Amino acid sequence: MKNKSPNTILFASGLFLCILVFWVNLSIGSVAIPVGEVIGRFFGQEFSKRSWETIVIGYRLPKAFTAILAGITLSISGLQMQTFFRNPLAGPFVLGISSGAGLGVALLIMAGSAFGWSVYSGGLGLWAIIISASAGAVLVLLLMSLTAWKVKDSMTLLIVGLMFGSAVSALISLLAFFSNAEQLKLFTVWSMGSLGSTQTNQLIGFLIASLIGIIPMMLMLKSYNAMLLGEAYAESMGVNINKLRWTMIISTGILAGSATAFCGPIAFIGIAVPHMARLVFRTGDHSVLFPASALIGAIVLLVCDAISQLPGSAQTLPINAVTSLVGAPMVIWLILRRNFSKEF
């Protein structure tokens, strides 16, 4: 009972902060809209200007929900990989999922011209990117699943995943070398990550994919704590290791693959947010860490998205650059603060 009260306060504070950042995210950008007007719109009031309706409902609202979903999926998949490999540097993309999604998009954009394809023709451009990225992520996930079936050691699987990622990155580099400037620019822009290209109908697909990835993990939540002490210990506690390994791999593949497909590769979130959750909530219990990581991931990505919009400017910074520049110092500060408080 002792730990529940502080955790409840932390979760309540985090939820309040998430809602606050969400409203701020909807109000700032190239066109500043008062927060009061934004909140009033969701309680049945009309905007003072008609153009604000299109800006908020048509563009900023889907982008904010995309940021929340991407923050949740990347954070949870990162926590799963750190538990699976018992490695603090493991992230959602150590299995090569992101590289596989990148290869799918690279084939569509940079190899497509050889067959006369046009990526952004009509209204199917974004769906073509999403389908290609998903196909690439699923292909690598299948290869990693076959490897996991043959290889029983987690560290060996980690090395194989890194090798898959390196091989796929090499193929992407070859495609980039033979592509023209326009194709290379399109792929580079995609690889920087974006939260603003997801439309409402695509957001529903992202939500469904996220739920499919989260549900298997929730069904085996009690087994995750045992994994922290090693597979042998977990097995002695009655955990079905093979079932848990498959759950972790498939769940992470779906979560990381869907986030990459809809938003492009987004760095930092998957590796750093689980550490932030451990530092803030001061626990290793996964029943606390999973919702904590999801909540902090949503907050961090909403903050990074707000910064990337450059309020008052028509320019938007790449979300990848912002997540790394904002997030890395934040984690360093939290670590130094914890170590400083231990010394005194």
Image (cartoon, rainbow, N blue to C red):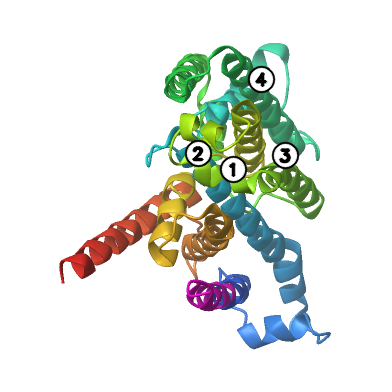
Q: Is residue 269 above or below residue 339?
A: above
Upstream in the sequence, badge 4 or badge 3? 3
Which disc is residue 227 wearing?
Answer: 2
Q: Closer to the camera: disc 2 or disc 3?
A: 2
Q: Which residue is mark 4?
A: 142
Residue range corresponding to the magenta coloring? 1-15
User: Where residue 337 appears, x then y in whole percent?
Assistant: 25, 66
- Separation of disc 4 and disc 3 at Cα? 24 Å
Upstream in the sequence, badge 2 or badge 3? 3
Q: Which residue occupies 59% across, 29% down?
A: 241
- 207 on left or right of 221: right
Upstream in the sequence, badge 3 or badge 1? 3
Which disc is residue 309 wearing?
Answer: none
Type of amino acid under label 4: Leu
Q: Nearer the viewer, residue 161 or 259?
A: 161
Q: Closer to the camera: disc 1 or disc 4?
A: 1
Q: Which residue occupies 43% across, 47% down?
A: 268
Principal SS element in the magenta part?
A: helix
Type of amino acid under label 2: Met
Type of amino acid under label 3: Leu
- Separation of disc 3 and disc 1 at Cα? 38 Å
Q: Which residue is mark 1?
A: 223
Q: Residues within 10 Å of mark 3 (few under 14, many from 20)?
A: some
Q: Is residue 145 above or below residue 291?
A: above
Type of amino acid under label 1: Ser
Task: Indicate whether residue 13 is drawn in magenta.
Answer: yes
Q: Is residue 185 above or below residue 196?
A: above
- 93 on left or right of 276: right
Q: Residues within 10 Å of mark 2 (few under 14, many from 20)?
A: many
